[in-house]
Image (cartoon, helix red, strand yellow):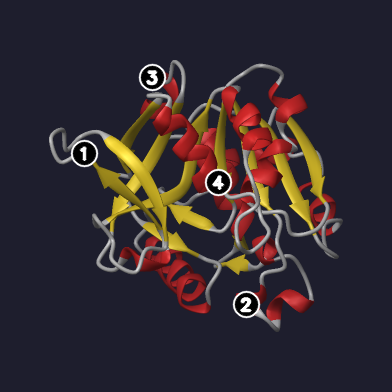
């Protein structure tokens, strides 16, 4: 299993901070946002990682992360997404890196203390989604369940006005190599991007989707509210002496 962190985009929701650097390099307490995504993968046993970035500040990642050795990464690569092609387009850049292996994909502005390891170790084929029950899922991709089999997802709806469930699709996914074929089959959405929801629905239509509920905190750090909350949570965790947000390189491999 290899890991892919999608860390592109212009971060417009975080202007003017993102005029200076990529949003994934903004601080969450004493580290950059992307460090926590890296640790999510390392704690799951994944130490071959590709970071896909883009925009005018892509080179900043090299200065911050370097080879990744001091973070506990065995092998680190970088990919560059030209333009704003969407999450699925960014994922397509990982095809050569995957080299026919499954990949765990993390959206770099998603923040969690959940353990992805059991799902990673139990993965065999198809795709696996991490869902989270939320009070208002209208700004998320939302899982639609079979009324006759409530454990089976029959579709993902992107930001529905009337959600059919309260389970949001988080920015953590596991895909086999079919994902890259599904991206090639995808058509741009109304906003001109290749959507990861389209890829997920291909898996669902082919009966190849499983899911689990994300067992832990989940925040979107791409907004000021989410970024502030992540800083608050980590600061309080440090004050209490908890290990859950400590760097893996410091020996904190277990959540």
Secondary element type, mark 3 = helix
Q: Can residue 29 be seen here?
A: yes
Which one is nearer the viewer's eye here, 126 or 44? 126
Residue 149 relative to residue 16: left or right: left
In this view of the protein, which residue sits in the foreground, 254 or 7? 7
Q: Nearer the viewer, mark 3 or mark 4?
A: 4
Residue 14: which numbered mark, if any?
2
Q: What residue did someone put label 4 on?
A: 196
Residue at 20%, 34% (x, y): give it: 151
> Percent from the top left, x then y, of residue 61?
79, 53
Tell me how far mark 3 sits from mark 4, CA to CA. Answer: 22 Å
From the top left corner, tell me how far across and down residue 199 is, in percent. Answer: 54, 39
Identify the residue position indicated by label 1 in the image: 146
Residue neighbourhood size for the residue with mark 2, other residues' Cα within 10 Å, grouped as few (<14), some (14–19), many (≥20):
some
Q: Earlier in the sequence, mark 3 or mark 2?
A: 2
Residue 88: image quadrant is top right
Of residues 174 and 218, the one nearer the viewer is: 174
Identify the disc placed on residue 122: 3
* Quadrant, the N terminus: top right
Q: Is 179 left, or right, of 136 in this rendering?
A: right
């Amino acid at each position: 299993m290899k890991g892919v962190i999608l860390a592109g985009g212009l971060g417009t929701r975080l202007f003017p901070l993102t005029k200076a650097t990529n949003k994934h390099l903004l601080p969450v307490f004493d580290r950059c946002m992307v460090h926590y995504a890296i640790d999510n993968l390392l704690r799951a046993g994944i130490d071959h990682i590709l970071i896909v970035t883009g925009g005018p500040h892509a080179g900043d990642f090299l200065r911050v992360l370097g080879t990744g050795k001091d973070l506990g990464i065995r092998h680190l690569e970088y990919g560059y997404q030209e333009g704003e092609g969407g999450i699925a387009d960014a994922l397509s850049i990982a095809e050569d890196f995957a080299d026919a292996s499954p990949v765990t994909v993390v959206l770099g502005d998603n923040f969690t203390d959940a353990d992805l390891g059991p799902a990673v170790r139990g993965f065999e084929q198809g795709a696996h989604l991490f869902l989270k029950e939320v009070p208002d899922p209208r700004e998320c991709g939302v899982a639609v369940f079979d009324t006759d089999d409530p454990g089976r997802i029959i579709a993902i709806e992107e930001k529905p006005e009337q959600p059919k469930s309260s389970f949001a699709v988080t920015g953590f996914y596991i895909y086999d190599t079919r994902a890259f074929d599904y991206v090639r089959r995808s058509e741009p959405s109304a906003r001109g991007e290749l959507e990861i929801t389209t890829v997920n629905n291909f898996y669902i239509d082919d009966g190849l989707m499983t899911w689990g509920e994300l067992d832990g905190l989940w925040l979107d750090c791409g907004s000021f509210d989410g970024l502030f909350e992540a800083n608050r949570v980590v600061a309080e965790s440090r004050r209490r002496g908890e290990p859950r947000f400590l760097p893996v390189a410091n020996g904190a491999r277990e959540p």
